[in-house]
Amino acid sequence: MRSALDVAREAGADDVPIGAVVFDPAGIELARAANRREADGDPTAHAEILALRAAAARFGDGWRLPGCTLVVTVEPCTMCAGAITLSRVGTLIFGAWEPKTGAVGSLWDVVRDPRLTHRPEVRGGILEPDCKALMLAFFEPRR
């Protein structure tokens, strides 16, 4: 999680500071990314999506990430939860819960839906105070 926090701090001034890191089954880092939605003008440029894309380019058959772990500072949204499931990530670890848009237990639980063919192991709330503090520091001056 500390690696994901480090990369989250690299997000541009206008992008929500969320960081994601993908590790292979041996624990070797494959990819890392921070949100770039504002910087790229791309609604899909969430940290998770960017990290999954980069990891998939380096690992496996080009899109599947079996046995890999995705670590992200904030509970993924619906789009990212769908991508996590479709990429076949083995484990998802996240920091802060996101009650407004979270799709891994807060608002929805996309990744554990029993109707899906793949469901990663999930651990949430890891280093939550640190992850939450980063989000609060970003949003407080904007509200």
Image (spheres, rainbow, N blue to C red):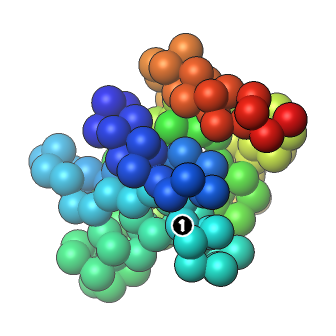
Quarter in which the N terminus is drawn: top left
| Amino acid on which the number 1 mark rests in the picture | Arg
**Residue 52's image quarter?**
bottom left
Residue at horizontal 86%, vertical 35%?
143
Q: Is residue 67 visible?
A: no
Is residue 143 rendered to the left or right of residue 20? right
Is residue 82 or residue 53 the one in the foreground? 53
Percent coordinates x, y for residue 97 in the rendering: 68, 29
Percent of width and height locating residue 125: 56, 22
Q: Bin the neighbour count of mark 1 within 10 Å (Cα to Cα): few under 14, some 14-19, many 20 and up.
A: many
Q: Provide the secondary structure element on which disc 1 rests.
A: loop
Q: 35 or 102, which is in the foreground? A: 35
Q: How many marks?
A: 1
Which of the pair 77/115 is nearer the observer?
A: 77
Can the viewer see residue 59?
yes
Would you name the residue on which mark 1 appears? 36
Q: Is 13 on the left-hand or right-hand side of 141? A: left
Seen at 51% across and 37% down, the residue is 73
Spot the residue most to the front.
141
Residue shown at the point (63%, 57%) measured from the top left: 14
State the residue at coordinates (49%, 20%): 130
Q: Residue furthest top?
A: 129
Q: Vertical placement of 127 versus 22: above or below?
A: above
Q: Is residue 75 left or right of residue 35?
A: right
Q: Position of residue 54 (x, y in %)?
A: 33, 74
Q: Is residue 65 above or below residue 93?
A: below
Indicate the position of residue 10 as horizontal and vertical percent values.
39, 50
